[in-house]
Amino acid sequence: MGRQIRVPGVLLAALLLAGGAGCSGPAGTGSPAGGDAKPQPSGSAPPPPAGAPGGGDVLPGMVTTAVARTRLAALKVAPVGTMAGYSRARFTHWAEQGDKCDTRETVLERDGAGVKRDGECRAVSGTWKSLYDGVTVTDAGQLDIDHMVPLAEGWRSGASGWDAARRKAFANDLAHPQLLAVTAASNRSKGDQSPDLWQPPDRSSWCQYGRAWTTVKSAYELTVTEPEKKMLTTMLDTCAS
C-alpha cells in the first residue's frame, strides 16, 4: 500500500513544478509576450469629425503613406469612362449643415484661422493658406471649395452608376479628404483633371494630394487609369519615410 501512495505524490509534485515554471518564468518564456494585449479591432477606424485633420495634414480623414500605397494597389484600373449623361446638377452640392451654414461655409471655417461669420454664416474675415499653390488669402471671396476628386472625374470613374443620395454624399463629404478651400486660380487651373494631367504647382503638397486622392477613390470604390496610378505613385514617393 505504501508504494501505491508514494507514486501519485511524485507525479503531483512534478506537475506542480511544471505549472509554476510556465507562469512565473523570466521574460521571454512561458506564454507569448502579446498574450495579455487587448485585441485590435478589425477593419479601418471610423473617419474623424470634419474639423479634425490629423497632425501635419490640412484635410480630415487622411491615411498614412503606407496605407495609401496599399489602397492604391487595390484600386481597379480601367480606361477613362464616358461623360455621357453627366451634369454637375446631378451631384447636389453645398448641402445645408445646420445653423444656416452650408457645406461651403463649413469648409471655409474648418480650413481657415480666426474665421468670423456674419448672421448668415458667411465668412467675413479670416486667413487661409491654399494647399495647391501655398498662397495665403484673407478674403474668402478669393477662395473656391475644391472637390479633391472632381465631380466629373468621379462620374467617369464610377459615379455614373450611383443613385442621387450617394452622389450628394460624395459632393458634400466632410469626413474624407474630399473638400478643401484653395485659391480660385488654382482650382480653375485644375478643373476636372486627374493627377496625371494636373499636379499642384506647390510640389510640397504632392504627398498630401496623392494620399487624399487615393483615400477618396478608395472610399468610394472608384477606378483609376494606368497613367493616373503611376502619377499617384510618384506623389506618394515624395512623402517623408
Image (cartoon, rainbow, N blue to C red):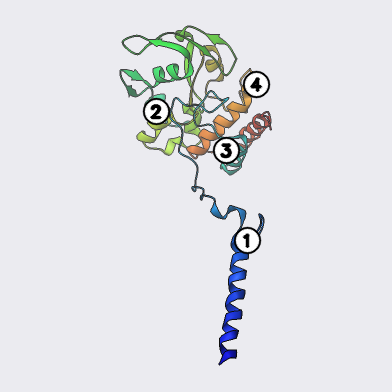
Within 10 Å of disc 3 (Cα), the crowding (few <14, some 14-19, many 20+) is few
Is 67 left or right of 216, judged from the image as shown? right
Residue 51, placed above or below residue 143: below
C-alpha gap between disc 4 and disc 1? 50 Å
Q: Position of residue 240 (x, y in %)?
A: 68, 29
Q: Which mark is residue 91?
A: 2
Looking at the image, which residue sits at the far bottom? Answer: 1
C-alpha gap between disc 2 and disc 3? 22 Å
Mark 1: which secondary structure? loop
Give, as a three-letter code, the residue at label 3: Pro
Image quarter (top left, top right, bottom left or bottom right) of the C terminus: top right
Q: Which residue is mark 1?
A: 30
Q: Position of residue 178 (x, y in %)?
A: 48, 28
Q: Which mark is residue 204?
A: 4
Q: Which residue is mark 3?
A: 79
Q: Between residues 224 and 6, which one lies in front from this camera angle?
A: 6
Is 68 left or right of 144, judged from the image as shown? right
Q: Are marks 2 and 1 in contact (CB under 8 Å)?
A: no
Q: Earlier in the sequence, mark 2 or mark 3?
A: 3
Q: Earlier in the sequence, mark 4 or mark 1?
A: 1
The residue located at (59%, 39%) in the rendering is: 67
Task: Say if residue 86 shows up in the picture.
Answer: no
Within 10 Å of disc 2 (Cα), the crowding (few <14, some 14-19, many 20+) is many
Residue 174, placed above or below residue 26: above
Mark 3: which secondary structure? loop
C-alpha gap between disc 3 and disc 4? 29 Å
Within 10 Å of disc 1 (Cα), the crowding (few <14, some 14-19, many 20+) is some
Q: Are marks 3 and 4 in contact (CB under 8 Å)?
A: no
Q: Which mark is residue 80?
A: none
